[in-house]
Image: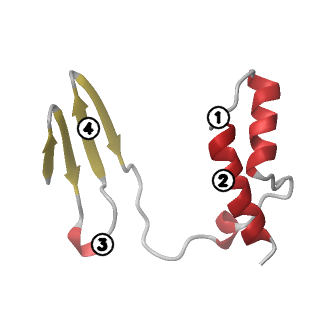
Amino acid sequence: MKQWGGTDVTERWMIPELDCFSVKEIYSSSGARNVTVVESLQEGEPDRSLMAVPPDYTERSPAAVEDLREKTRGEGAFGRGLVGRMEKNYQRRKFQ
């Protein structure tokens, strides 16, 4: 399957029998090219440990993440306006 959008071209190789994501994708844009290839594919349920939360995981609110990024990198990632909206949604969902 090829898709063209302006100067961008994306070529995807699929396996219809698996009804899944692309096993190979070639993206070309303005002379640049990115190739992504699945090197190993195993059907079946994934190991449950792959879905486990790491023991050293720390949950942080969007505001806490933005503060930490500002302290460690000298600039935020999203800007205070977006972080304020994200924080509001985070707090609302956290306490439902």
For marks 4 and 1 on the same chain, the one whose residue lies earlier in the sequence:
4
For marks 2 and 1 on the same chain, the one whose residue lies earlier in the sequence:
1
Q: What residue did someone put label 3 on?
A: 18
Which one is in front in this view, the residue at disc 4 or the one at disc 3?
A: 4
Give the SS element for disc 4: strand
Examine the rendered structure and indicate whether residue 65 appears above or below residue 7: below
- Which numbered tag is attached to residue 50? none
Which one is in front in this view, the residue at disc 4 or the one at disc 2?
A: 2
Give the residue type that dot 4 points to: Tyr
Q: What residue did someone put label 4 on?
A: 27
Instruction: Residue at 69%, 31% (x, y): give it.
Output: 76
Q: What residue did someone put label 2 on?
A: 85
Distance of label 2 from label 3 (alpha carbons): 39 Å
Q: Quadrant of the N terminus?
A: bottom left
Distance of label 2 from label 1 (alpha carbons): 14 Å
22, 44: nearer the viewer: 22
Give the SS element for disc 1: loop
For marks 4 and 3 on the same chain, the one whose residue lies earlier in the sequence:
3
Q: What residue did someone put label 1 on?
A: 77
Distance of label 1 from label 3 (alpha carbons): 37 Å
Which one is in front in this view, the residue at disc 4 or the one at disc 1?
A: 1
Give the residue type that dot 3 points to: Leu
